[in-house]
């Protein structure tokens, strides 16, 4: 019997069976779940960019405006809920969202206890002392692929990223220039990126020598004074953004002008790329760097 005819038959009974009607209505009104994969929330932008890159069901992310500024691509889907600050998430918002799973990085692992009372919570590690960064990027992608029930998409992200960076490497000359990749903290201090970091791993795959050989921390950078760049050989590459007022101060800095003169060329300036990122940020950095070298 067609559903509508059955409902009319029930309604016309002298004593309709309400217990039967209600389940039928519930079945008819229940939304179809097209994607059974778990609904995931995270505080971490590196985890988020990977989840978005593998088409996972990301439903909540902390500081979306910050992600948009520092990570930018892949873009956060419009229906993802902002969970407040990464360091101080809105736990009521997380609870109301009711995710199936929560993913964290070690930087925010102090929230694991409270978040695990809302949903099963897993901490994923990427950067660490002595880590071999590119294999670690592959591992993280595969781990998140299993976590999000998107293993095939994770393998595709790895393959697509490595293919794209190999294509970009083909655009470079046989002996590309050595570079020194920096990000300014103020007009006198900067991060300079070397071993263990995302940028260095991309430079290696592009066949570009990194001019900074000094010690680095677990995230692959050293915090140094501007004068310490005299120890590095290569063209300066500045990853934006500049802190407020720093770009103007550098234009008046005799020391910075000497460093530029020593490198032989004006610095290359790149749009922001998340230096603590995963494969999507690695591809973005490779794209931006090769475009800048092509143009200069």
Image (cartoon, grey):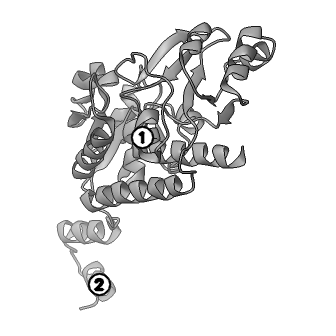
Residue drawn at point x = 35 percent, y = 28 percent: 196
Secondary element type, mark 1: helix
Q: Nearer the viewer, residue 103 or 126?
A: 126
> Considering only vertical position in the picture, is 296 above or below 124?
below
Q: Locate the N terminus and report the quarter of the image it occupies.
A: bottom left
Crowding at label 2, few (<14), some or many (≥20) Cα neighbours within 10 Å?
A: few
Residue drawn at point x = 29 percent, y = 58 percent: 155
Residue drawn at point x = 33 percent, y = 85 percent: 4
Residue drawn at point x = 54 percent, y = 14 percent: 231
Horizontal arrangement in the rendering, residue 169 relative to residue 21 (left or right)? right
Query: How far apart, in angstroms, are the residues tagged by discs 1 and 2?
Result: 64 Å
Secondary element type, mark 2: helix
Front tag of 1 and 2: 1
- Percent x, y for residue 282? 45, 43
Label 1, on which residue? 204
- Percent x, y for residue 153? 32, 60
Q: Nearer the viewer, residue 29 or 45?
A: 45
Horizontal arrangement in the rendering, residue 88 relative to residue 105 (left or right)? right
Q: Locate the C terminus and report the quarter of the image it occupies.
A: top right
> Considering only vertical position in the picture, is 254 above or below 290?
above
Horizontal arrangement in the rendering, residue 144 relative to residue 257 (left or right)? left
Q: Exactly how many numbered labels are in the figure?
A: 2
> Considering only vertical position in the picture, is 265 above or below 142?
above
Label 2, on which residue? 3
Quadrant of res 240 = top right
Q: Nearer the viewer, residue 239 or 40?
A: 239
Horizontal arrangement in the rendering, residue 216 relative to residue 15 (left or right)? right
- Percent x, y for residue 18? 22, 67
Residue 239 visible in the picture: no
């Amino acid at each position: 019997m067609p559903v509508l005819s059955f409902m009319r038959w029930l309604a016309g009974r002298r004593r309709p069976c309400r217990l039967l009607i209600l389940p039928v209505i519930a079945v008819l009104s229940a939304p179809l779940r097209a994607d059974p994969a778990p609904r995931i929330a995270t505080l971490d932008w590196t985890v988020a960019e990977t989840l978005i890159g593998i088409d996972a069901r990301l439903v909540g992310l902390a500081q979306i405006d910050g992600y948009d500024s520092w990570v930018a691509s892949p873009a956060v889907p419009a229906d993802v809920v902002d969970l407040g600050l990464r360091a101080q998430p809105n736990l009521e918002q997380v609870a109301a969202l009711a995710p199936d799973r929560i993913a964290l990085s070690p930087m925010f692992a102090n929230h694991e206890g409270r978040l695990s009372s809302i949903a099963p919570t897993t901490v994923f590690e990427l950067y660490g002392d002595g880590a071999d960064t590119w294999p670690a990027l592959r591992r993280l992608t595969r781990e998140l692929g299993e976590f999000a029930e998107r293993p095939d998409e994770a393998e595709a992200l790895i393959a697509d990223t490595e293919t794209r960076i190999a294509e970009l490497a083909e655009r470079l000359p046989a002996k590309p220039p050595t570079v020194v990749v920096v990000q300014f903290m103020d007009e006198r201090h900067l991060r300079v990126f070397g071993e263990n970091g995302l940028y260095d791993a991309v430079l290696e795959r592009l066949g570009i020598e990194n001019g900074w050989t000094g010690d680095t921390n677990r995230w692959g950078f050293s915090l140094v004074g501007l004068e310490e760049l005299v120890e590095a050989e290569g063209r300066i590459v500045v990853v934006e953004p500049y802190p407020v007022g720093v770009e103007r101060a550098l234009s008046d800095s005799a020391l910075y002008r000497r460093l530029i003169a020593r490198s032989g060329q004006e610095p290359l300036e790149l749009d922001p790329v998340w230096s603590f990122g995963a494969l999507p940020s690695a591809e973005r950095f490779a794209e931006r760097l090769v475009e800048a070298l092509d143009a200069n």
